[in-house]
Image (cartoon, grey):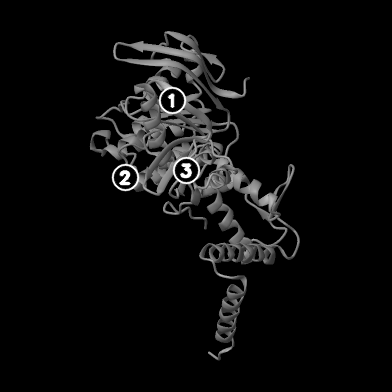
Amino acid sequence: MFIISQTDKRPMYLQIMEQIKQQVAVGNWASGQAIPSIRQLAADIGVSVITVKRAYLELEREGVIVTRQGKGCFVASDAEVGTRIREQELAQHLEQAARSAALLGISQKNLEKRIRAIYDRVADAEKEPV
Amino acid sequence: MTDYAIELEGVCKSYPFFELQNIALQLQRGTIMGLIGPNGAGKSTTIRILMGLVHQDRGEVRVLGHRMPQEQIAAKWDIGFASEDMRLYDVMTMGWHIHFMKSMYQSWDDAYAQLLLKRFGLNAEQKIKGLSHGQRVKATLLLVFARRPKLLVLDEPTTGLDPVARHEILRELTAVMVEDGRSVLFSSHNTQDVEQISDQITFIDRGRILDSMDKEAYLDRWRRLRLEVPDGVVLPPLPGIIGVRQSGRLAVATANAFMPHLPSEYENSGVRVHAVENMTLEEIFVANVERSREEVNA
C-alpha cells in the first residue's frame, strides 16, 4: 500500500506523510479509525521506526492523526479531516503559484485573471456531457 | 540493565598501518544503527572489538551490559553475529545446520526458521556447497535470525546480494524491530540500505567517528543551496556551511548544520537563493568523507 520512491528527492518521512494523507483524503482511512502503530507501519513499509515516528509526529502537529496514550494512533475524529487535507494542498499550490508569479514580475491582477481563465476552462470541461 | 545494547568509550586499537582512534558509540535498545564509511575506515575492526574477537588496546566496551572481551561468553548467548568471512559446512545440508543450531540455542524458533526458509527460497535438503553466494549469505542470516537474539550484529549483510535478496534481508531486519527491545547494528557501503532502515547513523572514516546520531536529525542538518551571486557581491562565509563551489554567477553551497534562517542570511547580503535541496545519505557520505580528508591533508 505504501511505496517509498527512491527517485523522489524528498525525505522518506515526507513521502510517508503524503501517502497517509492520501489514505485519509480518499476515505480509505476514515476519521476516528485506528491506524497501524509506528513499529507495525515501519515493518510493513520496510523503513526505520524513527522515520515513521517523525511522519506521525508531523501529522499529529497538522491535526491529521491523534495519539492516545496506551491506546494507539487514530485518524483525527473531526468529519472534515479529508477536506482539510485537500484544503491544505490547495493552499500550498496557491502559495507556490504566487511565488512563481512574483519571481516573474507578474502583477497580482494578471495572476488573478489567469487563474480565473483556468477556473472557467476547468469548470466548463466538467459541465460538458460525456 | 542499562538502556544501551552497545556502549563503546575511548576505544583505541593500533595496527602497523591502521589506527582506530578514541571510538565512542552508543546503541540504544530497540533501535537499528547503520555503520557506514568507505573501505578500510574501521567498520569491521569496530565490530570485531565489540564482539570480543579483537581486543582493544584501551577503552571500555559493554555489550548487553557485559564487559568485552572479558565477559564475551555470557554476552554471546544473546547476540546474533554474522560476517562475510563466516563459513558453513560445505558437505552438510541446510537442514543439518538448522538442527545443529537448534541443539545449541534454547531461544531457537523453529517455526520462524521454516518460514524464513520459504521466504528466502532455500531448501533444507540442499548441501551448502551447491549454494550461490547470495544463498549462502541468506542461509547464514537465517541461522542467526531464527535464534531470535536480543542483539543482531551484522557485518555487511547485504554486500554481493541481488536486489531481490537485499530487499528480503532488509524486510526481515525491519520485521525484527516490531518486537520491543531488540537491537541491530549493521555495517554497509550501501547508503540506501542505511538510509532506509536505520534509526541511528554512525559515520566512520580513517579510524575516527565523524558523526553518530539520530538518522532523521542527521539528514535534516544537511542541505544543498543553489545560489546566484550577482556581479559585485561576494559570498559571505556563513556558519554551518562546509563547502562552496562557485562558477561565475552560480554557486552551490553545502550545509552540514542547516538552520531555517540560513537562506535569508544569504539574501540579506545580496545573494539570491534559487533552491534549498535535501540531500540523500549517499550525497552526504561523499561530502563528509571529502571534508574529513581535506582536514587531514590541511
Instruction: Identify the mark at residue B73; answer none if there is no mark.
Output: none
Q: Residue at x 56, y 37 (%)?
A: B217
Q: Which residue is mark 1?
A: B103
Give the farthest residue toward the front.
Answer: B232
Chain bearing mark 2: B
Mark 1 and mark 3 residues within 8 Å of each other at the beta carbon:
no
User: N-terminal of the two: label 1 or label 3?
Assistant: 1
Quadrant of the rendering where the C terminus of chain B is positioned: top left
Chain bearing mark 1: B
Disc 1 marks a residue whose amino acid type is Ser
Could you give the CA–CA distance between mark 3 and mark 2, rounded to whole angstroms? 17 Å
Mark 3 and mark 2 residues within 8 Å of each other at the beta carbon:
no
Q: Give the number of the mark in front: 1 or 3.
A: 3
Mark 2 and mark 1 residues within 8 Å of each other at the beta carbon:
no
User: Would you say residue B113 is visible in this rendering?
Assistant: yes
Q: Left or right of A83: which side holds A124?
A: left
User: Would you say residue B126 is visible in this rendering?
Assistant: no
Q: Left or right of B179: which side holds B41?
A: left
User: N-terminal of the two: label 2 or label 1?
Assistant: 1
Image coordinates of residue B37 in percent, x first then y, are 38, 30
